[in-house]
Structures are given as C-alpha cells and as structure tokens.
Image: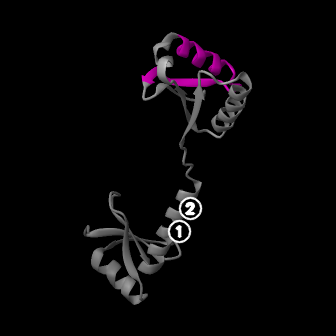
Amino acid sequence: MAPELRVVSETGENLGVMSRSEALAEAERRSLDLILIAAQANPPVAKIQSYDKFRYQKEVDIKKQKQTQKVLALKQVQISLREAKNDLENKARRIDEFLVKGHRVEIQLTMRGREKGLKDWARKKMEEFLVLLQTPIRREGEIKQGGRGMLLQIEKER
C-alpha cells in the first residue's frame, strides 16, 4: 500500500489525503475496515467501510452483470436434398425466429449415399433455401463440405 491515500468514508464523503497510519487509525476509530478501492490512482483511493458489506456489494454487482449479459447460442437446423418445399419454408421461418433473437444459425444440408456425389446440386439447393429467409443475413464464410453433407453458418445482418 502507498504511504499516502485519498480516503472516502462509508457514506461517500471525501475525507481528503491522509497517511496510511492516519487512515488506519480513522477506520479503527469508526470500528470499520480500510479497503483499497483504486490502487492505480494517484494517490491511491481507499474507503472506510465494513469489508463484509463491501464483499456483499461486489457479489450483487456481479449477479446483476450476469443477468444483463445476453448469452447467444449457435442454433442448428438440418435440411435434406429430398425435403418438400413446405418443410423448407417451415424451417426457414424457424431460422428467421432465431436470427431475430440474435442467435447464430448453422444450416446442415445432409446427404446420404449417392447424393454425396451431387455436390453442385446440393450447393444450388442450399442457395435456394437461403432465398426463403425473410431476415437479411450475413454469411460466416462459404458453404463448406463437412460431416454428412454441407454446412453454412449465418447471422443477422447488422
């Protein structure tokens, strides 16, 4: 700890710049603790307050931050080369809901057996499916060959 500190009381009142021993004596006189708040400041800032209350307040602040933080997941939707247009439209509406909520979506076009040889047709089918989406999208890379077919990650355009 620095030899001099800017001291603040438990009510937020500025008590001024004091030596470390004076600040400790003042905290002891009030039956409270001396807590270093901003070590990088010049002079460092310390607060006279109950350490338990300080720790509790920190926990409350962390909980509030976690509640306001929005966790976005990667949603996955599978389509097939043989799927009917109505089924594709339903899945496109579902993807639009995900995109409006701010999620990223991974579209997996599954291919089986001999379909794996029809890569150009599968790429065309994926492009036709993307046209069905109502929400403007931004692609995360290109359509990739992977796993059992083709993959594409999209998110809502900003």
Q: Secondary structure at mark 1?
A: helix
Residue bearing mark 2: 64
Q: Is residue 17 above or below residue 141?
A: below
Kindly indicate whether the residue at mark 2 contacts the one at mark 1 (C-beta within 8 angstroms): yes
- When the figure is inspected, residue 152 is found, relative to residue 117, above or below; the finding is below
Residue in view at x 42 percent, y 84 percent: 32
Residue visible at 67% across and 31% down in the picture:
91
Which residue corresponds to the image point at 25% horizontal and 69% vertical from the top-left? 3
Relative vertical location of residue 155 with respect to residue 117 in this rendering, above or below: below
Query: How many C-alpha atoms fall within 10 Å of the one at disc 2: few (<14), some, or many (≥20)?
Result: few
Residue 121, compared with residue 42, is above or below; it is: above
Asked if the stretch drawn in magenta spans residue 72, the answer is no
Q: Residues within 10 Å of mark 1 (few under 14, many from 20)?
A: few
What residue type is disc 2 on? Lys
Residue located beneath label 1 in the image: 60
* Amino acid identity at mark 1: Val
